[in-house]
Amino acid sequence: MRVGDVAIINGDLGRHGLAVMLARDALEFESPIESDTTPLAELVLALLEHDVQPHMLRDLTRGGLVASLHETASAARVTIELDEPVVPVREDVAGACEILGFDPLYVANEGRFVVFVAEDQVDRTLAILRQFEAGAGAVAIGRVTAAGAAGVVARTALGIRRPIDLLSGEQLPRIC
């Protein structure tokens, strides 16, 4: 990964972990929340077949987006800045998370990944992903901003940069 690389996710976050937790505890909300479980191989192969050169690609299962970003930043020794307002979370998922005290950035996903590509490949990557149902909600959510110091920060809707830490425990019990 290099400074300037852009982070792209293929859709909204939090549905799988929340759906499993709600089913486990027999909780119901006005609108049913269904898992995002779906195969991702077709999307990844399409990126490779169209000469997109991912610098990193990772699924967003255990620990959700934040855990994946931290593990990636640590391995690559880079700082990743997340543009928090553009991270897609469905309204029903956001509402359920708020009621239950969860942060959707930490909730497990089964049909989502983050891919880091060079800035000149962003438009092509988004166009390819959006051709698939599992990538219809693809969006660029951040970028690598520095090398040498591993970490994840978020830029909030107010433009404030804040560190995003890993949880000290598990937000949800292991679900898979």
Image: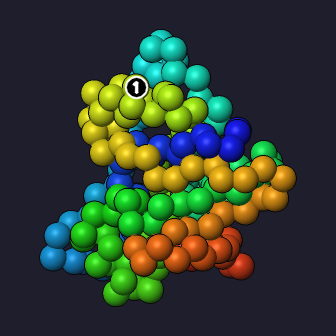
- Compared to residue 78, the image places residue 120 above or below, namely above
Q: Quadrant of the N terminus?
A: top right
From the viewer's perspective, tell me whether residue 18 is left or right of residue 165: left
Give the residue number, with chain letter if any, for mark 1.
Answer: 124
Q: Where residue 49 sits in the image (x, y, percent)?
A: 47, 12
Quadrant hosting residue 150: bottom right
Which residue appears farthest toward the left when viewing the image? 30
Q: Where residue 127 sits in the image (x, y, percent)?
A: 33, 29
Q: How many marks?
A: 1
Which residue appears farthest toward the right when viewing the image? 148
From the viewer's perspective, tell me whether residue 89 is left or right of residue 72: left
Q: Which color scheme is applied?
A: rainbow
Residue for point 62% across, 43% down: 4
Residue for point 70% across, 39% down: 2
The kind of residue on which mark 1 rests is: Arg
Residue for point 66% across, 53% down: 145
In the image, 47 versus 42, the foreground residue is 47
Few, some or many residues within 10 Å of mark 1 (<14, 14–19, 20+): some
